Amino acid sequence: MKTLKHILSRYTAFLWALLKPLGAWGVLAIAALDAAFLGLPMDAVVAGYVYQDRARFVLYALMASVGSALGSIVIYGIGYKGGEELLRKRIPPARFEKIHAAFDKHPFWSLMFPAMLPPPTPFKLFVLAAAVSEMGFVRFLLAIFSGRMVRFLILGLLTIRFGPDVVQLFGALFRRHYDWLLTGIAVGLLIWVMQRKKTLPPRTPAESTDRSLG
């Protein structure tokens, strides 16, 4: 465990040395690479930037979120051009049907919610599922950006309060209690969505007709 921690620390330090001269653009670049191809320690990178320059933590969260959305376009393209078979090979049939049904009913929330969560959430599988479900491209980008923005803003605030070690602390906590935390967040999000629906004014028949024609 100590050896793994040491390797991760050295790897993060190496990335930090490469990206630091690039400023906020380095955050965007590493987030795009992380979303498109590689599994990089994105939280550690953002925490490092925030800790070195706390006044710009919102900018770093913004750039990381934009980079993650742009990098995910690669996975979207793969899924849109025939990623269903690839997705079926990676997850059990029952889970595939469940995810597919979720995207049919609530495509935005089905992608934004996983985008908020840190590893070990298999986020690329949800990105692939969004593409297989033919989720609209603009909505796709907005869902990823929104979820990542929430995640990195919270990370930035925690880093300012507790320092960069918060990444390892909360990462270990999240992995240890992944199922319980995931269930709690899902229930909270469901309650929020239901309350939001109750506060929305009912649509008139004319509005419903116009919406269906559009």
Image: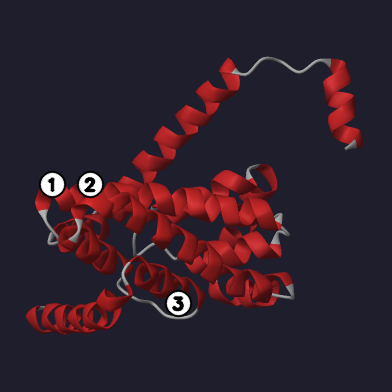
Q: Is residue 23 left or right of residue 211?
A: left
Residue 91 lies, with reference to residue 115, above or below; the image says: below
Q: Earlier in the sequence, mark 1 or mark 3?
A: 3
Question: Are circles 2 and 1 on residues that touch, CB within 8 Å?
Answer: yes
Q: Amino acid at mark 2?
A: Leu
For the C terminus, the quadrant is top right
Residue 157, labelled with which disc? 2
Disc 1 target residue: 161
Residue 145 lies, with reference to residue 26, above or below; the image says: above
Q: Judge whether residue 96 can be spotted in this image.
A: yes
Q: Foreground residue, 171 or 41?
A: 41
Secondary structure of residue under mark 2: helix
Percent position of residue 110, x then y: 56, 49
Report the Cα–Cα distance between label 2 and label 3: 24 Å
Report the Cα–Cα distance between label 1 and label 3: 28 Å
Q: Is residue 172 left or right of residue 148?
A: left
Residue positioned 20% across, 61% down in the render: 167
Graded by Cα atoms within 10 Å as few (under 14), some (14 to 19) or many (20 or more), the crowding at tag 1 reads few
